[in-house]
Amino acid sequence: MNNEKSLRSKLWQGIFCIIVGVIIWFLPVPAGISPQAWHLLAIFAATIVGFILHPLPIGAISIIACTALVILQVLKAEEALAGFSNTTIWLIVSAFMFAEGFIKTGLGKRIAYLLLAKFGTSSLRVAYVISTADFIIAPFTPSNTARGGGIIFPIVNSICSAIGANPNEKTNHRTASFFIFSSYCAVITSACIFLTGASNNALAASLSKTLFGITITWTDWFIACIVPGIILSIITPWLLYKIINPELKSTPKARELSAKKLVEMGPMSGKEKLLCGIFLCALLLWATSPIHGIDSAFVALLGLSAMLIAHIIDWDDVLHQKGAWDVLIWMGVLVNMAAYLSKLGLMDYFANAVGSSLGDTSWLIMLIVLSIVYVYAHYGLASNSAHVMALFGTFSAVLITAGAPALGVLIILGVLANSCSFLTHYGCGVTPIFFGANYMSQGQWWKIGFLISTMHIVVWLLIGLPWMKLIGFF
């Protein structure tokens, strides 16, 4: 019965997506817009609604949309498939493979346990150690679900058990709540700092290139985000410590558990050592890209090649990385549609229309207002990528047309698409994993999440924007 209801619900959701596209398709085409651009907008809008409602997996929706573009003669076949050559998308695909290496070899867990065994003497220190471990792993794990759910959460959940916490009992409940939520915050904050820390960052970078002709490199994103990101990484655990007030201040059990786990893992394997070397070389090549000129995607592909040659991962591991190939499909289709919307003049038309309606409002005031709307709109969304697809291009176009510094605005809005994840217990793919530990009620999660999201807006605008100006980004 429940399956029937679910199928019926998804059917109606799919019909609604089609209705949205049909309505836009047959509306009168505004003056100054070509019928081709308008029909492309209809398919694009239906696709976005599909990404939000999920009547089918987003990869399946993308295939349907790509097919519709050609069948309905909106784009030629070679135009509809052009997005799959996007190098930023291939950067993320390759980074997914690095994530597989970290999980398969156990290097990610080893890094976390080494730090905990040495520094995890108090509850607050445990939070900072987890944050540090996630920061180290994040450049090569562009999936919050893979990094948070596959590496960080199992470690933190084990620590909660080691201190005697249980979701159904009162013992050390606040301490477990602190560990769980601070670890979740660490995962999202790391995603803000690195272009390869989350797939939606790559989507924002791709849209920046296709819509505005602005290339955001891995190094650009890192330099722009490192200072406000570190400030948030320092402030957040301390603030949560004060708000949640864990019962345990000293945590010798965390150190004991970590030391035990390290013994169980044994000495560092040859593959782990090789992965460390590849990891460091890739970071060095990304940081020096202005000198050698190798595209960031091909640095990542070089690392993937090295992992395959060294048998750190094998080709079956690559084939089984469903998340990577899913990203390639839906991002390739979506970014390509956005690119053609820009080429056909629709984005400029919309930005100019909205800009004219706002009159002489300064771009800074507009940025503050739109950032608030942009973040809190996530109450109605459960995907950071859907958030970027729905709002990033439009909001960026309005601000850039109003005279805002393009690079600064694009990075800020790209980052805030991660920051909004704190708001709800369904904020992004990894959120239900941490919330599902059942150490925090929905009400508590939403209240604290609202506070952390608001703090992110303040820090990224008040510190992030001036920092970008100081380093010459605008």
Image (cartoon, helix red, strand yellow):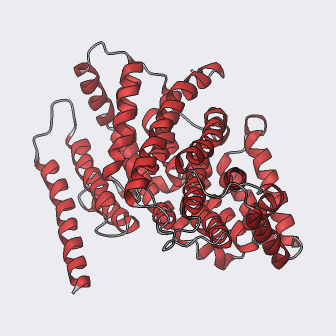
- For the C terminus, which image quadrant? top right
Q: Is residue 23 left or right of residue 469?
A: left
Who is closer to the viewer here, 324 or 230? 230
Q: Which residue appears at 32% of the width and 70% of the height?
A: 56
Name the residue at the top extreme: 360
- Where residue 370 sits, quadrant-wise, is top left
The tally of labels here is: 0
Q: Is residue 225 left or right of residue 281?
A: left
- Where residue 221 sits, quadrant-wise, is top right
Who is closer to the viewer here, 204 or 419? 419
Q: Which residue appears at 62% of the width and 43% of the height?
A: 238
Q: Is residue 163 above or below residue 83?
A: below
Q: Is residue 227 left or right of residue 53?
A: right
Q: Is residue 388 above or below residue 366?
A: below
Note whether residue 336 is visible.
Answer: no
Where residue 94 appears, x then y in whole percent?
A: 64, 60
Note whether residue 92 is visible.
Answer: yes
Where residue 334 appears, x then y in whole percent?
A: 39, 53
Q: Which residue appears at 63% of the width and 43% of the height?
A: 233
- For the N terminus, which image quadrant? bottom left
Name the residue at the bottom extreme: 1
Where residue 9 appears, x then y in whole percent?
A: 20, 72
- Where residue 96 sits, quadrant-wise, is bottom right
Where residue 106 appears, x then y in whole percent?
A: 75, 71
Who is closer to the viewer here, 108 or 201? 108
Who is closer to the viewer here, 437 or 48? 437
